[in-house]
Image (cartoon, rainbow, N blue to C red):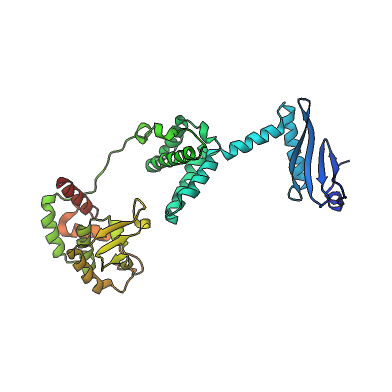
Amino acid sequence: MKLTDTQIKRTQPNTKPCKVSDGGGLFLWITPSGGKLWRWAYRHEGRGKLMTFGKYPDVPLALARERYAEARKVLAKGTDPMAERKAEKAAAEDSFKSVASLWLEHWQDGKSPRHVAYVRRRMDTDILPRLGARPVAAIEAPELVGMTKAIEQRGARDIAKRALETTGQVFRFAIAHGYARRNPASEIRPGDVLKSIRKVNYARVDARELPSLLRAVEVYQGTHVTRLAIKLLALTFVRTSELIGARWAEFDFDSARWNLPAERMKMRTPHIVPLVKQSLDVLDTLRTLTGESEWLFPGDRNANKPMSNNTILKALERMGFKGRMTGHGFRGVASTILHEQG
């Protein structure tokens, strides 16, 4: 006779453990303390076995019967259900997904929340669907190639490159902690898998034209704030996005340094910009204009946001440098001159 939920609830413990059968070897083992555990008695290769399906009521009657039915199907194929479950558990613990989770927990310490969220999203979207269920020690280089090329095919070459780099970090962690013995990601390079793309440099003037550009900046007829932004860009050669997002709180005038936090940097590491006298002069003048704002360069239309990236570009165009110079171009000119000087 089959059990019912009502019957299970009414069953009281005895002074000794007892069992209440549901048929087919499935029964509820009841301890003197009142604990109720689902068990299944079966035989495999002539030996008696006892498999558990969880505690009642965490595992209700219907779920216990479902797990019992699945186990019987495995037994019918000649496989020991308990051995298979143990193997599946071991595989899950050593899966790429499991190891990647441990790596992410270790790696994220000290990283910005924004960067961690980006890596986690890339992992969930692009890496785990292809590799997550695989045993980390069994993954081969061609599987990483397949993952990388699949991302590239949707037009996300940069993400494909970063996904390959991230898997390499996971494998290094796996080796360090005994989950794997080799790193298949180290056996290939992005250039072996991804199509090369032509690098396009930002428009910039030649070093010989720099004096005429700086003179044009000095007599620029636009707003003083925009003119000072271009001057500071020329003096510090930071990225345009780093300049227009600058806050007064980032500047240490006593030490003559600009402390850019990691979350505002492309490589997600803090960056220090030494401030020469000319930079400090620009900042002193600028402070009389925008010192009341959070931003060095607040927007014209909305002072609660920094100026637009196009503000500097349009100013350079009005000076007569359209197609010849961009805000990022100052960084390129500085790089060229500094490399030439060793």
Q: Which of 29 and 326 is in front in this view?
A: 29
Q: Nearer the viewer, residue 14 or 37?
A: 14
- Does 62 sit left or right of 117 as displayed? right
Residue at 31% in and 61% down = 259
Which quadrant of the structure image shows residue 92? Answer: top right
Which quadrant of the structure image shows residue 87? Answer: top right
Q: Which of 45 and 290 is in front in this view?
A: 45
- Does 107 sit left or right of 276 as displayed? right
Q: Position of residue 5 (x, y in %)?
A: 83, 49
Residue at 22% in and 71% down = 284
Q: Where is residue 126 in the image (x, y as percent from the top left)?
A: 47, 42
- Does 269 sit left or right of 224 as displayed? right
The N terminus is located in which quarter?
A: top right
Q: Is residue 230 visible?
A: yes
Q: Can residue 309 be seen in this view?
A: no
Residue at 31% in and 74% down = 292
Q: Position of residue 81 (x, y in %)?
A: 71, 33
Note whether 104 is above or below 139 in the view shown: below
- Does 34 sit left or right of 333 as displayed? right
Q: Where is residue 140 in the image (x, y as percent from the top left)?
A: 47, 30
Tell me how many marks there are.
0
